Amino acid sequence: LGSSVSQLDCSRLKTFSISGVDLDDKILCNFLAKTSQLENITISGFRSLVKFGEDFINGVDFSKLKNLELTDCTISAEILGKCLAKAPNLRKLKIYDNKPYID
């Protein structure tokens, strides 16, 4: 699946939703890094999103993001804060059933 994802043209993708898929978090981050028009992101069930937190923050363009939903993920407050700081157009935020990351 990783090589298939790397070949996709995602530059005009506006909505991305993923849940219950056995996908390496690094592949997810690399995929999202190829998008620049995302307005809606829904991620559910990624327990180790925090491991690639800096990749997630630095690689993904959040400037057009309007809606963010994180469910059943493990993410630190620091990484979440950095996401939100890079999303000036964010209008709707849903965060539930997430596990705090404790180092």
Image (cartoon, rainbow, N blue to C red):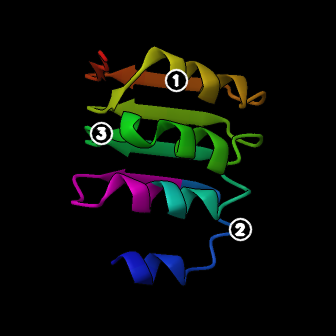
> Which residue is farthest front?
103
Q: Is residue 77 above or below residue 9?
A: above
Q: Identify the residue at image location x=75%, y=43%.
A: 64
Q: Is residue 25 magenta?
A: yes
Percent x, y for residue 39? Answer: 66, 46
Quarter placement of the C terminus = top left
Disc 1 crowd rating (10 Å Cα; few below 14, some 14-19, many 20+) is some
Q: Magenta residues, as a range? A: 16-28
Residue 56 image position (x, y, % from top left): 54, 44
Tell me the residue at 61%/29% (across/down). 83
Mark 2 residue type:
Arg
Is residue 75 covered in magenta? no
In 3D space, how far apart are the residues under numbered discs 1 and 3 (Cα atoms)?
13 Å
How crowded is the residue under tag 2: few (<14 C-alpha within 10 Å), some, or many (20+)?
few
Q: Which residue is mark 3?
A: 48
Q: Residue at x 52, y 25 (%)?
A: 79
- Res 57 → quadrant: top right
Horizontal arrangement in the rendering, residue 13 relative to residue 49 (left or right):
right
Q: Do the numbered discs 2 and 3 sit on residues whose CB atoms are within 8 Å?
A: no
Q: Mark 1: which secondary structure? A: helix
Q: Amino acid at mark 3?
A: Ser
Q: Report the residue marked by disc 2.
A: 12
Q: Earlier in the sequence, mark 1 or mark 2?
A: 2
Q: Amino acid at mark 1?
A: Leu
> Mark 3: which secondary structure?
loop
Marker disc for residue 80: 1
The quadrant of the rendering that contains the N terminus is bottom left
